[in-house]
Every structure is written in structure tokens, then in C-alpha cells.
Amino acid sequence: MRAVTITPGKKDSLRLVDDAPEPPEAEGPVLVEALAVGVCGTDREIIAMDYGEAPPGEDTLILGHESLGRVLADPTATFQPGDLVAGIVRHPDPVPCANCAVGEWDMCRNGRYTECGIKARHGFARERWRVEPHFAVGLDPGLAGVGVLLEPTSVVAKAWEHIAAIGSRAHWEPQTVLVTGAGPVGLLAALLGTQRGLTAHVLDRATDGPKPELTARLGATYHTGQVSDLDFEPDIVVECTGAPPVVVQVIDKVGPDGVVCLTGVSSAGGQVGIGASTLSRAVVLENNAVFGSVNANRRHWNAAAEALGRADREWLAGLITRRVPVDAYAEAYAPRDGDIKVVLGF
């Protein structure tokens, strides 16, 4: 079967192979036919050899961690043929640590987890894949065109869960959320914010293209320029750019008792000209909390499926700015101006 692969540690190794073996039953009893795979910065970083690890005893890694497929067969009867599903990316470590042992593998403490298409486990960019029932998430049939957005939605579902948990440390009635970065994670973070009844603001560098319109269709306000130029102090910030100057600015901008969630990953070595004392005063004197969030567990994937089910389908479709057939796979992994979410179709 066809699959998109790389050889970790080897330059220019991205390939579409047509002789990949069928997925072994050891991967799980549920056999799924791939419909689509989302492409994100993580895939490009793996291709650039920043990280990525093949399964034990193998030289190649099948890419793809944002999945959507239809069930072909499930001997456990958890799913029926034709059901729409996505595969959970992270799997618990084999020890397991205290968190993995209770299903909180997104908070793994020893780093021995595996991740489909990223770390020591083949991904979903292949015509067929297998999965254990507990690591497959069913989707509303009406989400066939946009269900590939489930993985990034799970990331922000976790972020919102943790924001609420931190906010509950005291009496808290948040009204506004600022999302920095209008990529897929940022726009989905804004979606979940509006679903929670918050007034949402989105800040991005783009002055044209689909991002301002998608923000407006959420009932949110779109901004460009600097965080410091904003004329309000948000109760919550979801930072999705990973740009060090933006990270510093949102920590300084958030209102009293505010919560800042960092979901973007900064490039190594990034520096900004601000002292630690300035940041500590901004956090300590206003009882603010800053935390990082990545990945998701089963609970967050279920919450994400519910959030997508309640969202406007046309709005979700607007996030997918390019659909590339698998035969033209290289185009999918080459970023273009104006891209929000690129999807590889099988």
C-alpha cells in the first residue's frame, strides 16, 4: 500500500512509497481506511531532522498524526464498518508512570511515551492503519469533510480544561480571551472560547486572506500589530505563536488574576530584551498564572469531538485552505503564504 515516509536523521528522505506493508495486527484490531491526514509544523520539523524516531528495529517512520478514516473491520464490535474515526496520537509509556497508568499520558513523567507519526510508532499517512479501540475516537458522520481537525482541536480542548482548573483557584468570572496566532490551533482555540460564552479577540500578522473573515464569523474581533497596542486586558490568553516577544508581551498584558496558556513552541535560542524581574512583577503582583500545554488524553479527544460536532461545518471547512492528493504529497509539506490547514487526501 502507499505511505508517506521519512528516514529519521537522513536529509531529503521524504518519500511516497507504494510497497509499504499492511498494518500488522499488533497495532490493534480495528482496521481503518485512511481518508485524510492533516499537515502541520511538527511534520515539517521531522522532515527537517529536528526530531522524529522510527519504531524499534526499523529505519523508516510513516508520517501523519492528524488522522481521519473509515472503519473497514472491527472484531471487537466497538465500531461498525463505515464509522468515521480518528486515531489518538500519544500512547502511554510501557512502565507506566503514575500519570500514564491512569490515562493521563499527555502528562507522562518519564518521557517514554510513543506518538503516531512522531516518536517510535508509525503514523496515519498510509492507505490503511490499525488502532486499538481505546485509541480510536468516533466522529459524527457529518464531519467527514472536516474531521481531520480533531487532533488540533484536542490540543486546545486540553488547554481550555487546564485554564478552567487554574482559574478555579479563586472566585473567577472571566469575560475575555485573547488568542495570539490565527493558525489552526489559534482559530480553534477561539472557537472553543466562544463556545464557552467568552468575548474572543484574535491577534495575527495577516492583514488579508481568510483569517480576518474566519475570526469575524465566530463573532470575535481580529487585531494586527503588537500585543501592547491592544486597549484591553484579557482575562485569559491562549498563546499559539511561540514567538518569544509575543510570549513576553502577553504575560505583561493579561489582566489581574489572569491565566496565560502557552501552546506555541519557541525556536531554540530565541531571546528578547526584557529582564526576569519585569516578568516576575507582572505575574506575582497581579496573581497571574502562566503554564504550558501540549498533547491530549482520551478525555480531551472526546471533548474535541463534541466541540466539532457543535461547530458550524462551513466555518470548519474554511480552516482547510488546501487539499492535496497523496500523489502530490510533496506539495502538502511545502508551506505557502495564506495556508491555515493543509490536508493530504487518500
Image: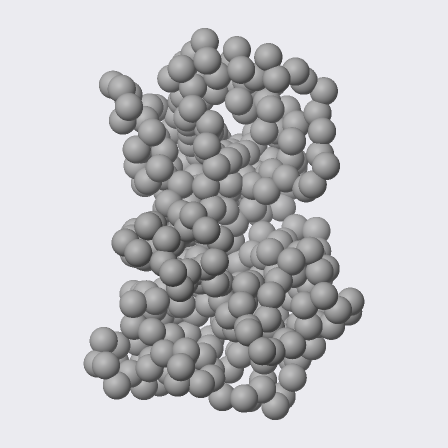
Quadrant of the image occupied by residue 164: top left
Relative placement, left or right, of 18 versus 81 is right
Q: Is 226 rendered above or below residue 120?
A: above
Q: Identify the residue at image location x=40%, y=15%.
A: 287
Residue 43 lies, in percent from the top left, at 61, 61
Q: Residue at x 55, y 74 (%)?
A: 56
Q: Quadrant of the N terminus?
A: bottom right
Tell whether 164 sits left or right of 317. left
Compared to residue 178, the image places residue 69 above or below, namely below
Where is residue 148 drawn, in percent x and y?
A: 45, 63
The residue located at (60%, 78%) in the rendering is 58
Q: Quadrant of residue 130?
A: bottom left
Give the camera-side residue of 266 and 222.
266
For the image shown, how many numbered marks are present on the structure? Answer: 0
Q: Position of residue 277 (x, y in %)?
A: 59, 12
Q: Position of residue 183 (x, y in %)?
A: 56, 46
Q: Is residue 307 visible?
A: no
